[in-house]
Amino acid sequence: MTNRAPRAPGSKAFAILEAAGADRAILDLKPFHLTQSTLLGKPVTVARTGYTAEDGVEVFSAWNDAGAIWDGLRKAGEAHGLAPAGLGARDTLRLEGRLSLYGNEIDETTNPLEAGLGWVVKLDKGDFVGRAALRTDQGKGRGSAAWSASK
């Protein structure tokens, strides 16, 4: 069904979706859940996820429906100040939200502590592959992260 995923992130995402005629299944969607529905008369899968650290959704559709959905969401969003944004904007938001991207901040040579991802590593929650090595590295201060962000 899918090859396209327009995103509607930000505080006005659900107001824009409502203006585009989204049904309750979409408007009441919980974070990290998805639903199948229709939007702008097209079958879609909508996921309340995204890689911007902003609340919003990703809309998955058939390739040949994506243009109409994009146009419809842009029109519905005009009154809300919606403007298309590129990968640079996405990267700024994801960095502020501490969402690392493989190949940029993390790769096979970077451990989670070096990448600033210690907040998702639970060293005291039981054994796992790599735990001993991370315990050894913990507190050495040998971070190589190329960025830092705080809210």
Image: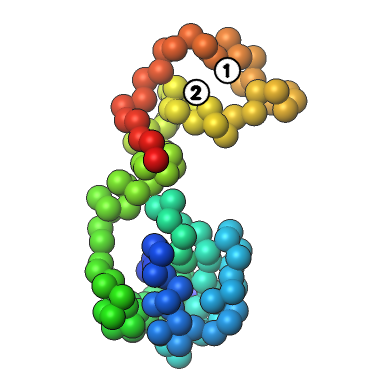
Q: Residue 134 got which mark? A: 1
Frontmost residue, 67 versus 142: 142
Name the colouring of the figure. Answer: rainbow
Q: Which residue is mark 2?
A: 113
Q: Quadrant of the C terminus?
A: top left
Report the amino acid beneath label 2: Leu
Name of the residue lying farthest toward the right: 126
Residue 41 sits above or below residue 28 on the image:
below
Residue 105 sits above or below residue 64 on the image:
above
* Horizontal arrangement in the rendering, residue 131 relative to residue 1 (left or right): right
The image quarter containing residue 7 is: bottom left
* Horizontal arrangement in the rendering, residue 129 relative to residue 147 (left or right): right
Residue 23 sits above or below residue 50 on the image:
below
Q: Position of residue 17 (x, y in %)?
A: 43, 78
Report the amino acid beneath label 1: Leu
Residue shown at 42% from the left, 44% from the top: 97
Q: Secondary structure at mark 1?
A: helix
Frontmost residue, 77 versus 57: 77
Frontmost residue, 109 versus 91: 91
Classify mark 1: residues with Cα within 10 Å, few (<14), some (14-19) or many (20+).
Answer: some
Residue shown at 60% from the left, 79% from the top: 25
Q: Secondary structure at mark 2?
A: loop
Q: Is residue 87 visible?
A: yes
Q: Position of residue 110 (x, y in %)?
A: 44, 24
Residue shown at 50% from the left, 78% from the top: 44
Q: Position of residue 50 (x, y in %)?
A: 45, 57
Frontmost residue, 101 versus 78: 78
Is the Cβ of the residue at disc 1 closer than 8 Å to that at disc 2?
yes
* Horizontal arrangement in the rendering, residue 104 relative to residue 48 (left or right): left
Classify mark 2: residues with Cα within 10 Å, few (<14), some (14-19) or many (20+).
Answer: many
Which mark sits nearer the N-terminus, 1 or 2?
Answer: 2
